[in-house]
Structure formats: structure tokens, C-alpha cells
Image (cartoon, rainbow, N blue to C red):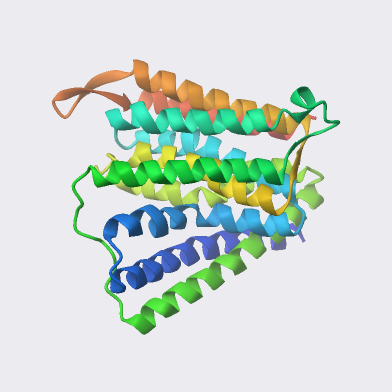
Amino acid sequence: MIFLYVLILIIGFLFLTKGADAFVDGASALADRFGISPLVIGLTVVAFGTSAPELVVNVISAVQGNVDMALGNIIGSNIANILLVLGAASFFATIPVKSGTVEKEIPFMLLASLVLILLSLDQYVEGSPVAFISRMDGLVLLTFFVVFLYYLFLSAKNRKIQDSDTPKLTLNIALAFTVVGLGVLMIGGKLVVLGAIEIASALHITQSVIGISIVALGTSLPELMSSIVAARKGKVDLAFGTVVGSNIFNILLILGITSTITPITLSSNSLFDLLTCLIISVALSIVVILSKEVFEGETRRVINRSIGFAFIVSYLAYIAYIFVRR
């Protein structure tokens, strides 16, 4: 029976990936037809599309009361983005890190992680019997997300806007892509949650562990595959920034929405995982700041193959640990 649920999980991940692609193409074409600028499309529709799998899975999990899986998905996705996605991509090409990302996006990622941990310390700050992320905490996270989105708009306005890659679709086809893509996303999310819950039950492991490992890995597949393909084609300039931006979106937007729907109670393991996520983010920052080498004729901060190998080993060790801990 467990093989059936594994199949359901895999089909769910495929639906999430294809649904997100169709939704982004359709919504981008609609926005373009109504005269919305490529800048706004890129910062909203496309950015949402990369986070759509995590968002759909988390909303469905929250509505169904499976908050452990929802939290595990976000923590696991952020850890996978740093250790697995960057690590795997660096095997195919050295990943340069832009100075603006080091100076602005990385500090914002660290701030988002730190704010989330501070909001989770109810037992120590307020004397609460349990630690939890409340609806009010969710609104705080969403407020920080609005600030980050405003920063993105200001930052993007200072850059030269390239020609739009928005697909040229007729109005009817664009509407169909949008509606069908959203529907496929919802079906995929339901299948992933169903498959993950049943697998956790069959293997007698917690939903949190399934969320951090299998579900998080599945929802991070679009970032993983796109980064590897970009690295193989030598187009790695945006790989690092994409990972950092995705982690910020996951904490501020997705976890903000999730906890606004249903408050999330945290176990001691969850607090440890949150702290681990922050430590990994800090480690990434230190590695990037200290790592410099000549790239395309100039000295730049990079993620090279040796750093990537260390990242992948660290990811495998962490996943092994969460499966054996009590």
C-alpha cells in the first residue's frame, strides 16, 4: 500500500510543477495584455510562481490542521535551497555572488530567519506553556514581506529593464492557462499532502520529518532543476539571488499566510530545526564573504565546487539526523 502513496506523492509533485508553469505563463500573458510592466510581472506573478508549490502545500496543510508538515516544509525547503540547490548547481559551474545580494538580500534573509525565531520564543518571552507562531505573528511576517516587496520594486527600478520574456498568448488561451494552472496546482497540493500523511503514518514517523525531508525536497525541485540547467548552460548569475529570494518568500509570505490561517504550535525539535536553518543561513553568509576567486577576469565572491560538495554532505547529514532523532 505504501507504494501507492509514494506514487500519489510523485504525481502530486508533477502536478505542482506543471501547474505552476502554466499559471505563471497564463497570468504573465494576462498582465502583459492589460499593459502591466515587465517589472511588476517579474516581481509578482513570476516570483509567486517559484513559491507556488510551497504555498499551495502549506495552505492545504494548514486548512486540514497538518501544521507540523507545513512548518517542516518551509524549514526543509530553505535548508534544501542553500545546501542542496546551490551545492548541486556548483558542481556544474562556479556560482558568482553579486555585491548587491551580499549587501542587501543576504542581510534580509538573516533578518527574516531571526524574526521568525524571536516570534517563536513564547515560552521564554511571555511564559507561555508552549511555543507557537500565532495569527498575530503571521501578520508581522506578512508586514515584513510587504517591506521586502517594496525594496524589490525600488531596487528593480534602478536597473535597466530587459525585454520581457512574457509569452504572447491570446486572451482566451491566457485565461485557460491561468485557470487550469491554478486548478492543477490545487490538485497537486492535495495529492502531496495526502501521500505525505499516509507515508508518515505507514512508516511511523512524524509529519514534521516528512515535511522537512520528502515534501520540502519535492517542492524545491523546480529551483533545483532550473539551477542545474542554468549552471550547465553557463547562466548562473541569478542562481544565488534566486535561492536567497526564495528563502525570504518562504518565511515571510508563505509561513505568514500559513500561520494566519492556523496558529502553528512548535515542538522542541521544531525550535531546533528553526535554529539550524538560521545557522545555515549565517554559515552561507560567512562562506560567501570569505570566498573570493577570479571569475571572468575579476575577483568576485563565489560558490565553487568544493564549497558545494561541503553543502551537499551537510544536507545529507542533516536529513539522516532528523530520521534517527527522537
Query: Which residue is situated farthest in the right direction here?
Result: 129
Q: Which of the 4 image quadrants contains residue 40?
A: bottom left
Q: Is residue 52 left or right of residue 201?
A: left
Which residue is pictured at 16% across the width and 29% down the height? 296
Q: Looking at the image, which residue is at 34% across and 68% down?
A: 31
Number of on-image labels: 0
- Residue 231 visible: no
Q: Quadrant of residue 61?
A: bottom right
In front of the other: 320 or 215: 215
Note whether 44 is above or below 148 in the view shown. Answer: below
Judge by depth and name the residue closer to the eye, 69 or 308.
Answer: 69
315 vs 52: above or below: above
> Among all residues in the image, which is located at the extreme bottom?
172
Please state if 160 lies on the left or on the right of 96 as rendered.
Answer: left
Image quarter where the C terminus lies is top right
Give 323 or 86, whichever is nearer the viewer. Answer: 86
**Residue 33 coordinates in the image, percent (x, y):** 29, 74
In the image, residue 268 above or below residue 67? above
Residue 323 position within the rendered picture, expressed as x and y whole percent measured from the top left: 71, 35
Kindly give the residue lying farthest to the left in the view shown.
Answer: 297
Residue at (37, 30) in percent of width and height: 104
What x and y, as percent, mark residue 8? 65, 63
Q: Looking at the figure, which quarter contains the N terminus?
A: bottom right
Q: Quadrant of residue 6?
A: bottom right
**Visible residue check, residue 180:** yes
As drawn, 16 above or below 99:
below
Residue 34, image x, y percentages: 31, 73
